[in-house]
């Protein structure tokens, strides 16, 4: 699964992962991170998510990273947002008011871009969009951007992986502990059954589908 895969998905309009409303779990649990407004939030693999506008409306700056130029330009056009376009290293940066989307490969994002500027990470559908090898690479890269540990709200899905090919992929607590547990405390905030909300997945043969919400926070040091 490479960048061409996602370019093709956006070009073909195969973006069932995109929601037409703000994610209710973001609304319900964002305050659990304990962040003061004014900080900046990194949103990896952001697509054209309306969640970014919700964060901005609550006083946070937003730094999104997205490989699809179509997704980035659609975000600004569909929300009637003024934007300034510039080159920023390996990325094309789209600057709006308290909101910047970097169009390019997430793995090209350097620590200097987020150092001292990002207080948290919001991951709604990034980790679960990637197959196992890429999830490990993604987590390593994200931890490299935040060497003091992550403060993150993470949403996942869990289902019997053998019943359906991803994306989205099933990611459970044992894998999260393997990916992040050495640097972060992984706390589950919510687990609930959502199979009834996704008849398309049920039609594919899924017998169980749970949405889970986690908080990742830096490990405490003495």
Image (cartoon, grey):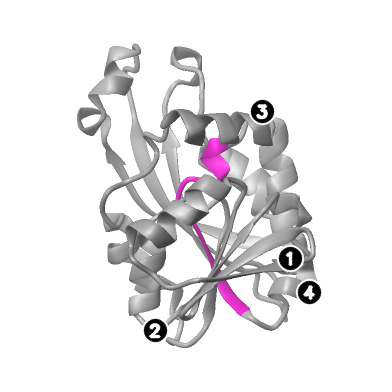
Residue 145 higher or lower than 98, as above or below: above
Task: Name the mark nearer the viewer: 2 or 1.
Answer: 2
What residue is shown with label 3? 1
Quadrant hosting residue 184: bottom right
Where in the figure is residue 169, as x and y percent of width and height? 51, 30
Question: What range is drawn magenta here?
Answer: 118-129
* Residue named by callout 4: 112
Front residue of this view, candidates 145 and 50: 50
Report how far apart the C-alphas of labels 3 and 1 lie in the structure. Answer: 23 Å
**Which mark, by number, is residue 200?**
none
Instruction: Identify the residue shown where x is 37% and y is 61%.
Output: 51
Q: CA distance from mark 2 to mark 3?
A: 35 Å
Query: Mark 2 — residue?
Result: 59
Question: Tag 1's secondary structure?
Answer: helix
Q: Position of residue 145 (x, y in %)?
A: 73, 65
Tell me where residue 77 appears, x and y as whole percent.
Answer: 39, 59
* Res 145 seen here: yes
Nearest the viewer among 47 and 174 is 47
Residue topped by disc 1: 145
């Amino acid at each position: 699964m490479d960048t061409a895969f996602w370019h093709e998905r956006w070009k073909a309009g195969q973006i069932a992962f995109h929601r037409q409303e703000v994610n209710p779990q973001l609304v319900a649990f964002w305050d659990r991170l304990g962040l003061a407004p004014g900080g900046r939030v990194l949103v990896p693999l952001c697509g054209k998510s309306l969640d970014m506008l919700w964060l901005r409306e609550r006083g946070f700056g937003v730094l999104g990273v997205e490989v699809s130029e179509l997704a980035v330009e659609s975000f600004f056009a569909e929300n009637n947002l003024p934007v300034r376009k510039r080159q920023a290293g390996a990325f094309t940066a789209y600057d709006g008011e308290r909101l910047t989307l970097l169009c390019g490969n997430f793995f090209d994002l350097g620590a200097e871009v987020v150092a001292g500027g990002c207080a948290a990470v919001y991951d709604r559908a990034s980790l679960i969009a990637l197959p196992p090898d890429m999830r490990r690479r993604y987590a390593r890269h994200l931890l490299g951007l935040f060497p003091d540990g992550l403060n993150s709200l993470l949403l996942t899905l869990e289902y019997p992986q053998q019943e359906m090919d991803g994306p989205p992929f099933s990611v459970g607590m044992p894998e999260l502990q393997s990916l992040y547990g050495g640097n972060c405390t992984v706390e589950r905030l919510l687990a609930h059954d959502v199979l009834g909300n996704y008849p398309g997945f049920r039609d594919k043969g899924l017998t169980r589908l749970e949405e889970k919400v986690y908080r990742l926070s830096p490990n405490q040091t003495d």
